[in-house]
Amino acid sequence: MGYKVVVAGATGNVGREMLNILAERGFPADEVAALASRRSLGTEVSYGDKTLKTRDLATFDFAGWDMALFAIGSDATREYAPKAAAAGCVVIDNSSLYRYDPDVPLIVPEVNADGVTGYTKKNIIANPNCSTAQMVVALKPLHDRAKIKRVVVSTYQSVSGAGKEGMDELWDQTKAVYNPTSEVPPKKFQKQIAFNVIPHIDVFLDDGSTKEEWKMVAETKKILDPKIKVTATCVRVPVFVGHSESINIEFEDFLDEDEARDILREAPGIMVVDKREAGGYITPIECVGDYATFISRIRQDSTIDNGLNLWCVSDNLRKGAALNAVQIAEVLGQRCLKKG
């Protein structure tokens, strides 16, 4: 006996990926409903070897459904998540709306799966920001061994993190560079993204950081350890899919790079590709479609007593969003909503 599962936002990049991953991983679903806004009503989406027609999110009755994976943004989530939760359907939300709510667990299964039991307070579980998710997967096993004091991270985030409009803008601007008669001014991004990098993701805050940077700080503390100091610089780069991060870690205790490499190789959800030779590392284009968080360039930081540097790459539509949501659903089913 399986679960009745809803995917809300099924026509978007993340929603489609959720459906793909549910099918790929053989999630025990007896029935899957694909929901979308009224303007997308009836659009067909793939679920394994099946085709589903989208249903209207606004009129959908969540009663009798076990869990709902939301990929519809904060505004729509604010309206529909409480309705689903009140009907007894556990919401796994990919937006930022509930991430900082103390009554809503913020979960990365490789890091804090035990926290999923906290869903009962509001019947909602939050999925973290894409850039945070891959980083804490890398930090967790190292923190368990040597206790992390401080993290300095610079991100190189793909345009798919900004949705279909971001991907379209990069594509159109790239074509326009080679066509002197056409020009595609920036709309989704603040400046041209083709052949450029933009050190600005989300809105600016009073202290000069952006909200994306603040998210990485706040979420790492909530998921991993509130005592860890984090400083981030988040940059949008002209890559379609796959976020990369340069991470500098300061530990309380010394951790040798070889031991760190061995620890990461054994850690769940991580693939180490770290050869000190040309091409002996992973780049974003190589991680697309993969479940793993890839770690490369592991090396000692000689400027501090207990420091390491590493390079972290992951498919942001998967581990950064859809995969993590499905993994949460798996943990929820195994530990809290057992069937049969």
Image (spheres, helix red, strand yellow):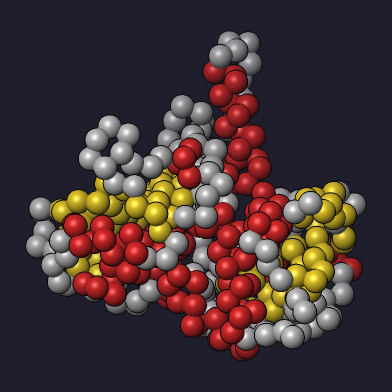
Q: Where is residue 129 in the image (x, y as percent from the top left)?
A: 51, 61
Q: Where is residue 100 in the image (x, y as percent from the top left)?
A: 51, 74
Residue at image coords 33%, 59%: 265
Asked whether, in this view, residue 321 is left or right of residue 204, the answer is right
Q: Position of residue 94 (x, y in %)?
A: 61, 64
Q: Nearer the viewer, residue 129 or 146?
A: 146
Location of the N terminus by quadrant is: bottom right
Q: Nearer the viewer, residue 205 or 175?
A: 175
Residue at image coords 63%, 27%: 172
Task: Answer above or below: position of 194 versus 72.
Answer: above
Question: Is residue 129 something one can see in this rendering?
Answer: yes
Residue 142 figure quarter: bottom left
Task: Answer above or below: position of 112 versus 220.
Answer: below
Furthest residue in direction top, as rendered: 180
Residue at image coords 36%, 61%: 138
Task: Answer above or below: position of 188 versus 203.
Answer: above
Task: Answer above or below: position of 282 versus 169.
Answer: below
Asked whether, in this view, residue 45 is left or right of residue 134, the answer is right
Question: Is residue 204 something one can see in this rendering?
Answer: no
Q: Position of residue 335 (x, y in %)?
A: 59, 84
Picture mark count: 0
Location of the C terminus by quadrant is: bottom right
